[in-house]
Image (tube, rainbow, N blue to C red):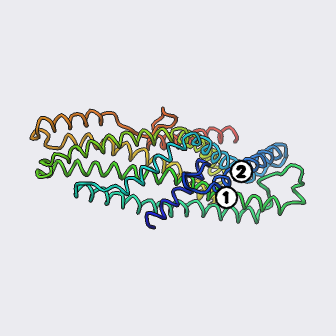
Amino acid sequence: MNFEKFIKLLKFCITSRTLRRVSGDSLYLSIFFIFLTFSMSIFVYFTINNIKKIMVDDNVDFMKVLFTVLMCLGCTQMLLKNYAIIPFHEEVESLLNWILDHHAKTEEDEIIQKVSQEEFAKALKYSELLFKIFFTMFMVPAMVCSYKFALSDYLIIAIPGLDQGSTVFVHKLLTIIFTYILTSWTVFSDMAIVFIGIYLIFFLKSINRLINVFGENSEVQKMPKFLICIIEKHAEMIRILRLFNESVKFISLMQLISSTLTFLVVIFFVQLFPNYLLLHIMLASLLSQLALLCFFGEIIRSESKEIFKNLYQTNWYDLSLKDQKIILLMMTNSLQVIGLKAGGLYDVGLMALVQILKLSVSYAAIIMTFTQ
């Protein structure tokens, strides 16, 4: 995938997430996703209506309850995450423009240009790889679930005014269609944030590489503009990270809350049916979605911390007084580690992933004890 194709894919992903077109794109794409949002909202109502019918049924089928609740949670999560980022469309578009500007930017220094090109090339490579992995991990459960819906004798939705017994084909067809819509839409919309996050991570890596080059090469230390360029990039990094954090703070919160509820449901049913393979596949897909967000938060925080360490390990004591002041200023700015925060308060990282899993397993075990 070349950079032009990547940008087209990124713009499509941004529109699918924010429901608003990127400047220069067709208005029809935004209208399409708005219509899809309206349709998904109606589908959620159908699943809730089916849950009501299940609750009054004397013979409850646990698998029917599971798939109905998961479908309802999945669609609701998608809608809430879209609603959470709609007000921040301009911020997301600013991040897109930052990627475009950085790709087209030519540095005066050859070393800085080389490092920037290499890191951005890695960002493009890993973006393509991660998209393929993420798409595969979500489409496999979607195909298995649609196959299960087609062959099973239970229905996931209940359309008001239509008898489920006489319109089984309609109910199953709508369920299968929306299963694929939900899966593909989840992948494309989530990748909008993932792609931007990958470029941010490799921009952080490029700054750390430049600091290491400056600390190890005495010839580079004599270049007056090299250190100035590093501090400019560091200031740009702080601005972009804050912009990114502001854009995804509510969507991160929605992801953590909905993932906790979904894990609770799936883990509870895994305990009930430990040999049911589809449950394990679904759990792995859900885990990968949350783990991706938490890993991004952890890497961004780690790379941000690394800047202070790399600055301290330079031979700052051999530099001129002016350069020492610049290094000290960057170290002072680096003391405030910038990472992802859900809702602007809760740190998103590996610890958050562990806590959510522990919470889900604990509550699932408690519910299992009471139901037995």
Give x and y (percent) for residue 195.
47, 54
Q: In the image, residue 179 lies at what x, y percent?
A: 69, 58
Residue nearer the viewer, 45 or 364: 45
Reply above or below: 196 against 343. below
Q: Residues within 10 Å of mark 1 (few under 14, many from 20)?
A: some
In the image, 204 versus 312, the foreground residue is 204
Type of amino acid at the residue the image marks with label 1:
Ile
Q: Nearer the viewer, residue 102 or 45?
A: 102
For the residues bearing labels 2 and 1, Cβ distance under 8 angstroms: yes
Question: Quadrant where the C terminus lies?
Answer: top right
Q: Nearer the viewer, residue 250 or 232?
A: 232
User: Which quadrant is home to the N terminus?
Assistant: bottom left
The disc, 2 or 1, on the residue closer to the chain's N-terminal end is 2
The residue lying at 14 percent from left, 47 percent from top is: 221
Asked which secondary structure carries label 1, the reply is: helix
User: Where does the image place residue 184, in percent across and percent down from the top left?
Assistant: 61, 59
**Given the image, on which type of amino acid does mark 2 rest?**
Met
In the image: residue 371, left or right of residue 117: right
Q: Pointer 2: what residue?
A: 40
Query: Which residue lies under the disc numbered 1?
Result: 181
Residue 274 falls left or right of residue 246: right
Residue in the image at 27% along x and 57% along y? 113
